[in-house]
Image: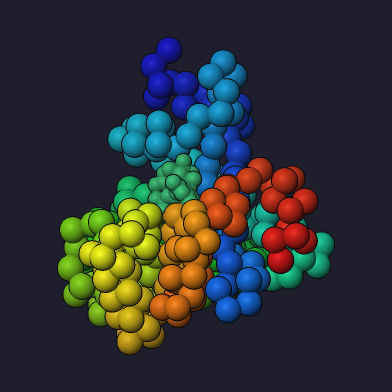
Amino acid sequence: LELETQLRKAISRDEFELYYQPKLELTTGKIVGAEALIRWNHPEKGLVSPGEFISIAEESGLIIPLGEWVLRTACMQLRTWQEKGIAPFEVSVNLSVRQLYQPNLVERVRMILEETRLDPKYLELEITESMMADSDHCLKVLNELKSLGVKISLDDFGTGFSSLHYLKEAPIDTLKIDQSFVRHCTVDGNDATIVKTVIAMAHQLNLEVIAEGVETKEQLIFLQRQLCNVAQGFLFSRPLPVKVFIEQFDEME
Ligand code: G
Ligand code: G
Ligand code: MN
Ligand code: NA
């Protein structure tokens, strides 16, 4: 069966699952957020990573219902955690460029927040630089999303082709330094300079900075010295299924 057909069926059969990866504040070690990352429990192939199906979902337009499922599921999950009295933290959801062109995206996000009764300040939408290529349209949508009260973060920072101009114009709260820069920041002078400079720039612009892909203690120490705010990566935890995430919550905090 063609992957697109399989994806279509998977949506109706509810074969998707969200994994959550914690984000830790570097001064306190506390969990301040979790990134929701989609997985497909394929009946034959087992767990399929988004790298294998997101682009097909985008091309076929299936990313619209799938993206809505992700948003609703993440908001519902966070509400459940909040109701259980688990310390409040943010949940972040990755948006595809296609979703910014969905005519009713802002309305759908507003409705999902209303349905799930989630305070919008706990929802963060992760967008990538390349999404701002058509600046006028994207800026308008981002401003409308922002006015709902949600946070916007710029994912994979440094790998896209957009200009620093958008950092000035777009309603961005957080910069996520791409893991490709973090990976060698303790062994490669250029990467070290890039990471330091991005952190300093973000702070000057009053943005919060998250380092992605933190895998070693040395990287963590480097980032702490640079006053990076938040970090995410295998050093702390891989993305985890809900049940495991909650089980590990106490020890991670
Ligand atoms: O979780 P993993 O590292 O396998 O994710 C691979 C890629 O898929 C990452 O770029 C991530 O941003 C993207 N991705 C994961 N979940 C979602 C999702 O729910 N929506 C979109 N649009 N992309 C996602
Ligand atoms: O594009 P985006 O930044 O959303 O991608 C997030 C992806 O990065 C997820 O698929 C997640 O599995 C992966 N990831 C998260 N932490 C680490 C890490 O420490 N090392 C590596 N190699 N990948 C990571
Ligand atoms: Mn992301
Ligand atoms: Na990224």
Q: Where is residue 27 in the image (x, y as percent from the top left)?
A: 58, 79
Along the viewing direction, whichever of 244 and 82 lies nearer the viewer: 244
Q: Is residue 47 above or below residue 140?
A: above
Q: Which residue is nearer to you in this view: 176 or 191? A: 191
Quadrant of image for the N terminus: top left
Task: Compare residues 66 and 151 and report the one nearer the observer.
Answer: 151
115 versus 198 height, above or below? above
Q: In this view, does 70 lie to the left or right of 185?
A: right
Residue 246 in picture, x, y percent from top left: 74, 53
* Residue under the point 44% across and 59% down: 212
Percent position of residue 50, x then y: 45, 37
Question: Is residue 151 at least partly visible in the picture?
Answer: no
Q: Quadrant of the C terminus?
A: bottom right
In the current view of this chain or complex, which residue is farthest to the top? 1
Residue at position x 60%, y 52% from top?
237
Q: Is residue 132 left or right of residue 90?
A: left
Q: Residue furthest right?
A: 84
User: Quarter-wise, where is residue 32 in the image?
Assistant: bottom right
Residue drawn where x is 59% and y is 57% of the image: 236
Q: Which residue is drawn at 33% across and 81% down?
A: 200
As drawn, is 77 to the left or to the right of 50? right
Quarter where residue 76 is shown:
bottom right
| Nearer the observer, 146 or 126 | 126
The x, y position of residue 31, in whole percent, is: 64, 67
**Where 115 falls versus 8 (above or below)?**
below
Q: How many labels does the image show?
A: 0
Residue 47 in sight: yes
